[in-house]
Image: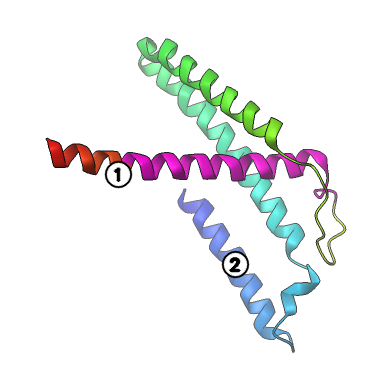
Amino acid sequence: MYAFVAISVLLLGAIIMNQEAAEDALALADGSWTGNIITWTIAMFVIGVVLIILSYFFGWVIDPSRIVKDLIMLVGFAALIFICWSMSDSTPMNLPGYEGSENQAPWLNIADVGLYLLYIFTAVAVFAIVASEIYQLFK
């Protein structure tokens, strides 16, 4: 996690320094950093998925009784991803100055799935906080 944050901060710092070095305030409007940001986002996604799978595997080795419960949860998460994928749109976006290959169907769908999951998990977190406070009020 700390490595992800550190690399993301370094990437953001490079973008900000690039903008400050430019003559105009709209230096990022040319899209010169878009490809780097998209590549880093895809790398974080892939690394995160691999780490989640490895953590489940090692958890099962340590405590085999968790396998059924974890598999049910993984099937539910896969169903949620399938629902989000079916709601996603693969219409290419208008990214000025970007000519990379990520502005097409599979990558745009992955971005939409990530956004939908972010919205769902944020709503669940807010609901859990409010429900916990209400529960504590009546306890």
Frontmost of labels 1 and 2 is 1
Examine the residues drawn in magenta and state their main secondary structure. helix
Residue indicated by mark 1: 130
In primary-sequence order, the first of circles 1 and 2 is 2
Q: Is residue 38 above or below residue 20?
A: above
In the rendered structure, which amino acid carries the disc numbered 2? Leu
Question: Which of the numbered marks, if any, corresponds to residue 22?
Answer: none
Q: Residue 67 versus residue 87: which sits nearer the camera? A: 87
Q: Is residue 123 above or below residue 20?
A: above
Q: Is residue 52 left or right of residue 88?
A: left
Query: What is the spatial separation of the Cα atoms under label 1 and label 2, in whole angstroms?
Result: 34 Å
Q: Position of residue 77 (x, y in %)?
A: 53, 26
Residue found 39% across the figure and 42% down from its top: 125
Residue found 73% across the figure and 85% down from its top: 22
Residue indicated by mark 2: 12
Q: Position of residue 127 (x, y in %)?
A: 36, 41
Say whether residue 100 is magenta.
no
Residue found 78% across the figure and 67% down from its top: 31
Say whether residue 115 is magenta.
yes
